[in-house]
Amino acid sequence: MAISPPTGSRTRLAIVVAASVTLVTLGLRDVPVIRDLREGAATVTDPIQSGVDAVTRPVRNAWHGVSDYEDLQDENERLRDQLEEAGAADISATDAQRQLADLSLVLDLPYANDIPKVVARVVSGPRSNFSHAVQIDKGSDDGLAVGMPVATGAGLAGRITQVSANSATVDLITDPEIRVGVRLASTGDLGTARGQGRGDPLVVDSSIGPRVQIAAGEGVVTSGVDRSVYPPGIPVGTVKTSRSGSGGLALELVVEPSVDFDRLSYLTVLQWQPG
Amino acid sequence: MTTRAKLFRAALVLLAALVLQVTMLSDLRVLGALGDLMLALTVAAGLTGGADRGVTWGFATGVLYDLMLDTPFGLSALTYALVGYAVGLAGSALMRTSGWWPVGVAAVAGVVQATLYTALANLMGDAFPFGHLPAIALVMAAWCALLVLPLIRVMWWVHGHSEPDRLEVLLR
C-alpha cells in the first residue's frame, strides 16, 4: 500500500526540518545563545537531577551488580590480593575502600604540583550514546572555568567544556573531536593524540619517521608546547603498537589511555589556563 | 480535554522523561550503550497520533535532550523529528496488518535513529566512530521495543484517544 501523507503533515515536517537545521547551524557556529541555553538548562535541572539521582541510586547499583558482575569479580580478586599483601585486617566495606583510594589518588597527583586543584565527584556518565562527556558536581562557584584540564591520579582525563554555577561538563579525551598535544616521555618526539570513542585506544599522529621502532609500553605525556591547552607532563597513556600512518610518511601510535574511563568516580580539575 | 490540559500533561511527560533519561537511564549501560527514552516517547507519539504528532514530539524531545548534551545542538531534534514522522506514516500504513506491529516498528525506529544520527554527525564533521553503531543500534532497538507499549498508554493519557483501534485492543 502506498503511503501518502496529507499535505499539512508534509508542511509541518518541512518547518520542523528547517528549524532543526537552523539550530544545528547555530550550534556549529557556537553562538552564545545556544551556550547560554545549555548552561541555563544545567542550572535549572541540577537540583532535580541530584534529587532523582539519590532516589534512583539503588536501582542503578542493582543494575551494575548484574551487568558488571564479571568486572566486580575481577576487582574483588585484585582487592583481596592487595589486602593480603598489606596485611589489612579490618576493612568492612570494599566499596568505601575503593572510593577512599580513588579520592586519595586525585587529592595527591604525582604531577602538576604547582597548579591549584579542585576535586570533584562524577555525578553522571555520558548522557547519550553519542556523547563523550561526564558531569561533575563542581562549577563556577568553585572556581571552575571552561577550558580547564581535568585529570585523575593516573593521568589526563579531559577538559571542561561547559560550566554552570554548581556543575560542569568534562569532555573526555576519548572523544574523536578532542586533540591533545603529546610527546614521547623518553625521546621527546611530538605528536597529536585523538580519541576513537569509548573503550577504544587513542591514536597519535606523530612526526616520527615510519622506519623508527617504538617499543610497546613507552610513556606518552602532554607536550605543553606553546599555546597548548594542557600543561606539560601529564601522563596520557602508554604505546600499545605503532604502525605506518596515512601516506606512509610518519608513524602512527596506538596508545592505551592511562585513565580507566569506565570507572571514573572522582576527578581533579587543574585550575590552569593556557598562557 | 482542553488544549491547556493537554499541553500541561505533555510538558509534565517531557520533563519527567528528560530527568529519567539523564539520571537513571544514562547509567544503565548494556554492551556499552544506553536506552533512549526520548526516542521511545517519539515513537509512541507517532504510533498513536500519526505523522503530525510524531514530528512534533520528535522535535520537542530532541531539542530538550540536546540542551543536556555536549553533542551538536539540534541533531537529536532533527533525527527524532524525521523518525517520528516516518513512524507516524508507518503506523498509518501498517495498522491493519498485524497485532504486535508497534513493538516491531519501535525496534526498527531505534536502529534507524542510531544510524541516521551517526551518519549525519559524520557528515557534519563530528567524527563519531561507525564501529560502535551495531551495539548502539541493537540496544536502542531493544529499549524502544520494551518501552513503546507503556509509553503508548502515556500518550493516550496526554492526548486522549478518540476512536478504538488495534492498539487499544492490544493493550486492553
Image (cartoon, coloured by chain):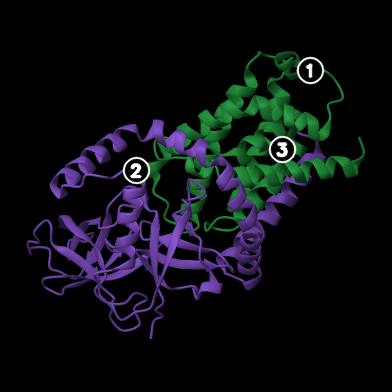
Chain colours: A purple, B green
Please check whether the numbered discs 1 and 3 fall on a single chain.
yes
On the image, the x and y values in percent for residue A218 come to: 13, 62
Q: In the displayed structure, does residue A223 sit left or right of residue A189?
A: right
Q: Is residue A152 visible?
A: no
Please check whether the numbered discs 2 and 1 fall on a single chain.
no
Local secondary structure at mark 1: loop
The residue lying at 74 percent from left, 16 percent from top is B166
Residue at image mark 2: A93
- Residue kind at label 3, given as amino acid type: Gly
Q: In the displayed structure, does residue A50 sit left or right of residue A80?
A: right
- Residue kind at label 1, given as amino acid type: Asp
Looking at the rendering, in which quadrant would you find the C terminus of chain A?
bottom left
- A244 shown above or below A199: below
Local secondary structure at mark 2: loop
Please check whether the numbered discs 2 and 3 fall on a single chain.
no
Labels 1 and 3 touching (C-beta < 8 A): no
Residue at image mark 3: B54
On the image, the x and y values in percent for residue B140 come to: 51, 35
